[in-house]
Image (spheres, rainbow, N blue to C red):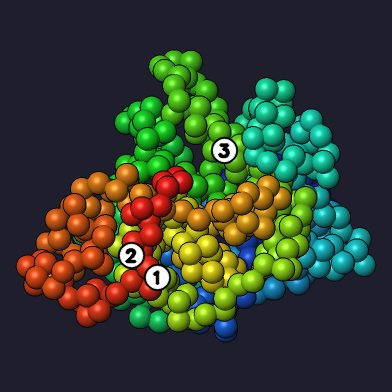
Amino acid sequence: MPKRILYWFRNDLRLHDNEGFARAVEMADEVLPVYVFEPRWFDELSELGFRRTGIYRAKFMIEAVADLRRSLQAKGADLIIRVGHSAKILAQLAEEIDAEAIYASKEVAEEETDTESDLSKLLKPINIDIDLFWVSTLYHVRDLPFWVSRLPKSFTEFHNSVEPYTAVRKPIAEPQTVRLVPGIPTQELPSLASFGFSDVDEAYQINENTTSRYAGGETTGVQRLHQYIWENELVKTYEDARNGLPSDDYPSKFSAWLALGCLSPRLIYQEVIRYQADRARNDSTERILSDLIWRDFFRFTALRYGSRLFKPSGIQQNLNKPWLRDKTLFEQWAEGKTGIPFIDANMRELNATGFMSNRGRQTVSRFLANDLGVIWTWGASYFESLLVDYDPCTNWGSWNYVADVSNDPHENRTINVYDQAVRFDEAGEYVKRWLPELAAVPAEKIHSVYNLSVADQAQYGVTLGDTYPLPIINPNRWATAEKNR
């Protein structure tokens, strides 16, 4: 009987720099690559009325799995696709092929680790091992200069403790050929409709305002990396672009492929280091490396604190902080109907595309949690549903910071929205792109449209409270407040 290993693809949908899959191919005579779609990922959150995984992220996920299947087929193998309960399906397949072990990437968030535990329990009675490999971060967990239980509380301390002293491992080459376990039928790739998305074409329509779409998958992710760094050299202006408002070319959007593991952070690191050596090193190239370390920090934070990351009390376990469960305020925020143009433009972009800039995320999340006082977990769940680049560690870790319940608390995380708007959208072009009802309002008045006189409203074709909402809070405090961002 040939030695067989089942490889369970999870959020590591790539062949390059994938230690677990490379080891499976090396160690086994035959490998069975498997991906399982879980219907629960697409469940509706009954309290909030939207899906855990919305249509943009679902489409990107399906594209990524399809791309992985094509890559495996090019190497003489295939991807066995199933829909259902991961642990049960994997245990059954492993027993059916008489596998010696299941190999997979190690995850750290609560739901994913629960699935690992469920699978381990099912494998034990049938004497099949499960080996998990750390493939998701820039720095390997075993290379950290401290135990995860001693993880620094602040990013600055983490960065200063790790970056000068810890080497980044070289990316692992992808296998040249894959010897597939024969005789196991695969299934058709599920469609969006199979997960209950109705009127898909209408829901996913693309218009001239929509940020350019990028297909999910390793192939497109690697192409984007090469284009961004070497062809267009956008890497040299990343520092300014990351805090700007989106265009088709910037920011990098690497995070979408990183989230599903279509791109390895070590490959990005390798290419940026090579660019620095061959062409230029500046604040922008260093910022990309720093942002990869930020991503590591959130992942190690999730490993350290577990389920606390997802609770309203946060990592701090702060049970005394009051939160409003006001559905009306939340829905006005989610729909981009707050009457604050910069907030509304960012939310409408998210709703139309599944993307939002770093600057936008910081502003709208702080507005929800700190200006409106609405429970922050609702906002985190909304981002989880819509963001194409959602990953649990970065999303929920970032919201912990915003809500002041993180492991690195700071007082007063409110943000001056008006200041943000005039600094980053001085001409009002971004707001007008997403709020066409304000297209005739001049730049000097666009970000304080709520102060338009009746005559101004008539002149610019705006009726406050009708064609554009009245503000849901008093925004004029920002005009005189100390600019805190």
Q: Residue at x 68, y 41 (%)?
A: 154
Q: Nearer the viewer, residue 122 or 55?
A: 55
| Percent x, y of residue 396 | 61, 58
Q: Is residue 175 visible?
A: no
Contact between marks 1 and 2 (CB within 8 A): the answer is yes
The quadrant where residue 46 appears: bottom right
- Compare marks 2 and 3 and give the one earlier in the sequence: 3
Q: Amino acid at mark 3?
A: Leu
Q: Residue at x 61, y 51 (%)?
A: 411
Q: Amino acid at mark 2?
A: Ile
| Percent x, y of residue 208 | 21, 60
| Percent x, y of residue 316 | 74, 57
> In the image, which is nearer the foreground, mark 1 or mark 2?
1
Please give the label number shown on residue 431.
none
Q: Residue at x 53, y 64 (%)?
A: 369
List the residue tagged with mark 2. Answer: 340
Q: Nearer the viewer, residue 264 or 402?
A: 402
List the residue tagged with mark 3. Answer: 292
Contact between marks 3 and 1 (CB within 8 A): the answer is no
Please give the label number shown on residue 473.
1
| Percent x, y of residue 355 | 40, 57
Q: Nearer the viewer, residue 252 or 441?
A: 441
Q: Amino acid at mark 1?
A: Ile
SS of the residue at dot 1?
loop
Vertical order, 239 against 379 (above or below): above
Q: Residue at x 26, y 53 (%)?
A: 430
> In the image, which is nearer the foreground, mark 2 or mark 3?
2
SS of the residue at dot 3?
helix
SS of the residue at dot 2?
loop
Q: Residue furthest front?
A: 480
Classify 10 Å Cα crowding around label 3: few (below 14), some (14-19), many (20 and above).
Answer: some
